[in-house]
Image: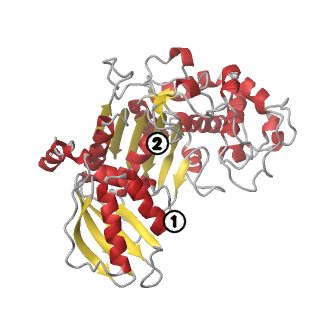
Amino acid sequence: MTTPMLAALVLASSSCLTAAQDLPPDASADPTTSLDAAFHAWLTAINSGNRAEIQAFYRQHADDPNPLFALEQAEDSCGFEVDHFKAKTSTSMEVLLRQKYLPGLQRLKLAVANAGDSKLKTLDLRPMPLPDNGAIQATRLVADRLAQRGEFAGAIIVEREGKRLFAASWGEVRPGSGRAITLDTPMLLASSGKMFTAVSILQLVAAGKVELDAPIGRYLTEYPNAEMAKVTIRQLLNHRGGAGDIGILGRDEGANRARVRTLAEMIQLNGGRPPEFPPGSKTEYSNYGFILLGAVIERVSGMAYADYVQAHIFAPAGMAHSGFPDRDHLDEVPLGFTRYFGEQEAKVPNTDTLPWRGSAAGGGVASANDMARFFGTLPTGKLLPPELFKLATMAGDTPWYGLGFVVNSGPEASWGHGGTAYGMDVAVHHYATIDTTFICLGANDMVCNRLIFAWFLRTFPPGDQDD
């Protein structure tokens, strides 16, 4: 049901696409002091809606030439009005700002090292938590506006304690096709598919067929490089093996992409390399490491990687709209659009940058409903024994990564995995302290990262909140 506040904000959305009006001067502000001058310059820049003006302020006052979060907040909120100052001295201030388009407040903290300084040592803006389902409402409004501007096509689901709080989809499978994206539409997963590889390996560990601390050479007996063959399964799962990238995912790697299709061919392309650093000595995110894990799955199970995942994850979890279609069979998968992460202004289809098909490093497809089923099934013991599920979803040698899962061990403890590539973005995470799963699948650059932060920041209070 749409609340009156939500309805009013939706009706106002079109007018919010224009720059916000100038604010009247604040009675408590003294624009002759450097901090007040900086605050009013910041507010004027944000409320202008002008990207160059906002970037110029951050470059001058915070040495930040590309303040992505501030640019997004200016666009999403359509500017701010001062609600009230919580604290103010000659060197610091904390002010609560009312958003013109979104519900709730945002908190701005500014500070300088010494009175009179023009450089800010603190410039912190973040939305304040909203009660009840306010964070979901705000996220929906952001998604609606992004979709109106052609910047979001995809789906979002939010579930708490096993109950669905919100589910919606935006856009078409192909622009102008009339085929709407639904919650059952399979969408490209990018690196979120690494969770399937991790679960598959851990299933084989549970079956006694793989050992976490065994070298991959035990299973890939003909592996070309002897040093890489010493890297362990665990080191690959937590990105501490030094395996590097695949060589087919970059914009300029089209030649490799055209001729490399299978896991075996990926190993032929990369198998002569030694580890990039002594395995276990540091962490570096590695796509090729998960290709090697996929090869281990194939060798030990006797099944093709995609067939194993279908039989041992998709089928038992009830994921009927998931798979690994090749590039010639993507008619049901929404077309992604990319600006190559800001390298160009015009959006183009991401077709030319897609590998032949998804792999053990990611790139398969699943629907939003299927990802909800996967997250709902994982803790039940149906896919993994409880002790291995716990091991996978808690931090190990890598503080932000378990075994194939991105984790957060802080007050907002979570597990899941994002996925970002040209023209696709995925954010799927479960937040244990509030037993809530957030799922976003998108067919645009970085859009689900933006949307999960819109929800997250309005759900959890800032760590330094004092009241």
Residue 400 in sight in this render: yes
Kindly state the secondary structure of the residue where label 2 is placed.
loop
Q: Nearer the viewer, residue 222 or 87?
A: 87
- In the shown orientation, is residue 21 left or right of residue 447? left
Q: Nearer the viewer, mark 2 or mark 1?
A: 1
In percent of width and height, residue 398 lies at: 64, 55
- In the shown orientation, is residue 2 left or right of residue 255? left
Three-letter amino acid code at the position of disc 1: Asp
Q: Is residue 103 above or below residue 440?
A: below
In percent of width and height, residue 423 lies at: 48, 33
Kindly state the secondary structure of the residue where label 1 is placed.
loop
Q: Nearer the viewer, residue 66 or 170?
A: 66
Residue beneath disc 1: 63
Q: How many marks?
A: 2
Which quadrant does the C terminus fall into?
Answer: bottom left
In percent of width and height, residue 344 lies at: 51, 38
- Please rate how many residues cluster around mark 2, counting C-alpha atoms within 10 Å: few if below 14, some from 14 to 19, many from 20: many
In percent of width and height, residue 215 lies at: 79, 42
- Give the residue displayed 42% in from the left and 52% down from the top: 431
Q: Which mark is residue 112?
A: none
Three-letter amino acid code at the position of disc 2: Met
Q: Nearer the viewer, residue 326 or 336?
A: 336
Residues tagged 2 and 1 counted as in contact (Cβ below 8 A) = no
Residue beneath disc 2: 446
Which quadrant does the N terminus fall into?
Answer: top left
| CA separation in Å, label 2 and label 1 | 24 Å
- In the shown orientation, is residue 423 left or right of residue 24? right
Query: Of marks 2 and 1, which one's residue comes earlier in the chain?
Result: 1
- Give the residue displayed 42% in from the left and 25% down from the top: 334
- Give the residue displayed 72% in from the left and 34% down from the top: 292
